[in-house]
Image (cartoon, rainbow, N blue to C red):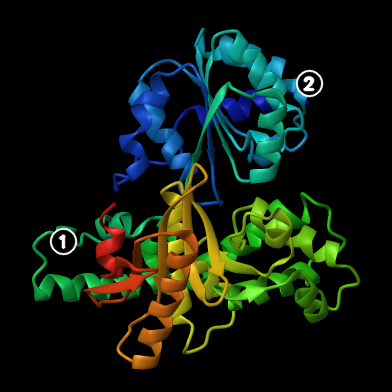
Amino acid sequence: MQRDLIKTAILEWQTPHVIAPNVQRKLFVNLDAMIRSELIVIITGVRRCGKSILLQHIRQQKKENHYYLNFEDERLVHFTVDDFQMMMEIFIELFGEAKTCYFDEIQNILGWERFVRRLHEQGYKIFVTGSNAKMLSQELGTHLTGRYVKIELYPFSFTEFLAYKNIAQNTSHAITAVKAKLNGAMKKYIQLGGFPQYLKEELLEYLQSLYESILYRDIVSRYRLPNDQIIRELVFYLASNVGKEMTFNALRKQLHLGAVNTVSEYCQYLENCFLFFLVKRFSHSIKVQSHSPKKIYAVDTGLARAIGFRSSDDFGRMLENIIYIELKRRGFEIYFHREKKECDFVVCKQNKIKMLIQVCLDIDDSVTRAREIDGLMDAMSHHHMTQGIIITLSDSETVHVEIQNKRCHIEIIPVWRWLTTE
């Protein structure tokens, strides 16, 4: 690649292109230890969720001479692994010696992990961002095992949404007016989602443009799909059925595809770019997990609403989606329970069940109340848990039940309270 093109890109990118965030994201609190460590820091997540802004925040925190380049720059489209040495020579020529490197979307360069490993062995501190989970995990697992720490970033959480909208978060003594305001903010959050740029002007066109960027850059182009029609139909179906169960065979019939494997691969592409997540049924049998239906969740409710079909009864499923993403954000492994009855979330960490959660808009109706409690009790009985949680829009109550001759209890919690406490 031409030296002058690389030099021009480096010069332009060395000055930060994004300003420091006006919202203190939760991840910022835990960054100091990662910054001080010798490990490579890998920041992953869907496009436009704030990875580059987080990188700029770290650059400002460290306040030392460093090298930075964004490999999404169209001038670097022909950059290859052979150009990394030239890039480092240009960095040194322009800015002198430095021992910290920041690389945005370096995954675009085939073989990047060997270069990063070499830099790390030479004593460099390295920060990397990427928007493709599979490519990063494969490369990290092969060449950088034990040398890195990974941060998964998502669109704004509810607490970050409140901070962005300047809404008070003190819920410890929530009076009626405060509760009403938080409840209203919660409904708005479900509708809008948490992409920072979208929240500035709330233009639907922004989310649609973001979707197009993800579709072409991270899927059609990366996996060299012959056309985009099938993947578009798949995205529309998944976005329209958030919170519902599906099977690859049913999708194959829906999309008129010849092979189940093709559907499975396409779904994997969508998971790789963090657009959708397919949640497995909880089972100690890998075969049961593999052959059971999966539940669909989107990375952001605002984006799902922008690219899927919306109906009047999907608000509850969007609420469920909010809980799923928050559980991901908090680092849990998530499954759903289906035995005699159903429970939305079996929440695990380090192979141990930590929580059982049901989600519904409200439990005012006796039929709904019985269904949610019975499903949770079935999960509690099956997994030998004495506590369960039902998250609703605004209900608050403790229900005492007896399961297998044990006194157990179910906490019914308003979603805004659950999201603002850990």
Mark pair 2, 1: CA separation: 55 Å
Up-down: is 42 above or below 419?
A: above
Label 1 sits on what residue type? Thr
Up-down: is 362 above or below 408?
A: below
Work out whether mark 2 precedes mark 1 in sequence or the reverse, and give the earlier one.
2
Mark 2 or mark 1, whichever is nearer to me: 1
Instruction: Please tell me which residue lies in front, 338 or 162.
Output: 338
Q: Can residue 364 be seen in this view?
A: yes
Q: Dot 2: within a 10 Å radius of its alpha carbon, few (fewer than 14), some, or many (20 or more) residues? A: some
Label 2 sits on what residue type? Asp
Cβ atoms at labels 2 and 1 below 8 Å apart: no
Q: Is mark 1 on a helix, strand or loop?
A: loop
Q: In this view, does 33 lie to the left or right of 55?
A: left
**To which residue does mark 2 refer?**
82
Residue at 39%, 55% in the rendered image? 156
Q: Position of residue 373 (x, y in %)?
A: 38, 78
Toward which corner of the image does residue 141 lie, by quadrant? top right
What numbered label is drawn on residue 171? 1
Q: How many labels does the image show?
A: 2
Q: Is mark 2 on a helix, strand or loop?
A: helix
Instruction: Please tell me which residue lies in front, 198 or 272.
Output: 272
Q: Position of residue 318 (x, y in %)?
A: 46, 74
Q: Position of residue 74 (x, y in %)?
A: 68, 41
Image quarter hosting the N terminus: top right
Residue at 30%, 36% in the rendered image? 29
Q: Where is residue 278 in the image (x, y as percent from the top left)?
A: 62, 62
Q: In this view, does 226 lie to the left or right of 136?
A: right
Q: In this view, does 388 lie to the left or right of 2?
A: left
What numbered label is drawn on residue 341? none
Up-down: is 104 above or below 307?
A: above
Residue at 67%, 76% in the rendered image? 237
Q: Dot 1: within a 10 Å radius of its alpha carbon, few (fewer than 14), some, or many (20 or more) residues? A: some
